[in-house]
Amino acid sequence: MKTMSSLFGVAMAVAVTLPVHAQFAKPEDAVKYRKASFTVMAAHFGRLGAMANGRTPYDAKMAAENADVVLTLSKLPWAAFGEGTDKGDTRAKPEIWKEAAKYKDAADKMQAEIGKLNVAAKSGNIDALKAAFGPAAASCKACHDNFRKD
Ligand code: ASC
């Protein structure tokens, strides 16, 4: 048992010190992971949009919860764009790797807007949510326009 727990400790230490891309066994796993993270992010972002646009009733607690999920998810996909992940079942354009600095700027911009959206959602003020939602959605779209096929 003692050996097991120290082995686990070693495994954990390796896991946290390895570069993140090394945490995917295969490029296909990284592609699946990033698509899944965007999918879940979009679901929760869409719930915020529905409230911001009046399609569903405003609920401050739900807004805050959804915004927290979106904020967490917004940090995840980027580590899954490593080497060899430009192929396979993906709509990612080659520009992501060819114009890596531009892609990083767009990803950073999105995360900044999602940060503001989170603050707005936590304010409990529907007008703040409405004001922050548009720029956040635009930051999603900017990336889709430049870096995603169709
Ligand atoms: C959404 C969603 C996106 C963005 C984008 C904004 O609700 O799923 O990817 O907004 O469509 O233009």
Image: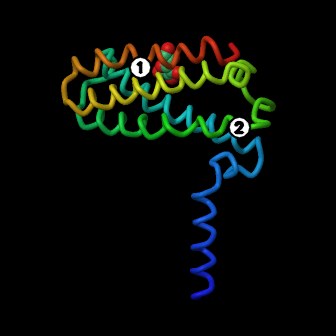
Q: Is residue 121 shown left or right of residue 142?
A: left
Identified by mark 2, the residue type is Gly
| Tag nearer the camera, 1 or 2 | 2
Residue 38 vertical placement versus 143 (above, below): below
Tell me which label, 1 or 2, sits earlier in the chain.
Answer: 2
Identified by mark 1, the residue type is Ala
Of the 4 image quadrants, the one containing the C terminus is top right
Question: Looking at the image, which residue is at 80% across and 32% down?
Answer: 88
Count numbered badges in the picture.
Answer: 2
Q: Residues within 10 Å of mark 2 (few under 14, many from 20)?
A: some
Residue 23 vertical placement versus 76 (above, below): below
Residue 127 has which mark?
A: none
Q: Secondary structure at mark 1?
A: helix
Question: Looking at the image, which residue is at 46% across and 13% down?
Answer: 138
Question: Looking at the image, which residue is at 22% across and 21% down?
Answer: 126
Task: State the residue position of label 1.
Answer: 136
Q: Is residue 135 shown left or right of residue 73?
A: left
Q: Secondary structure at mark 2?
A: loop
Residue 135 vertical placement versus 119 (above, below): above
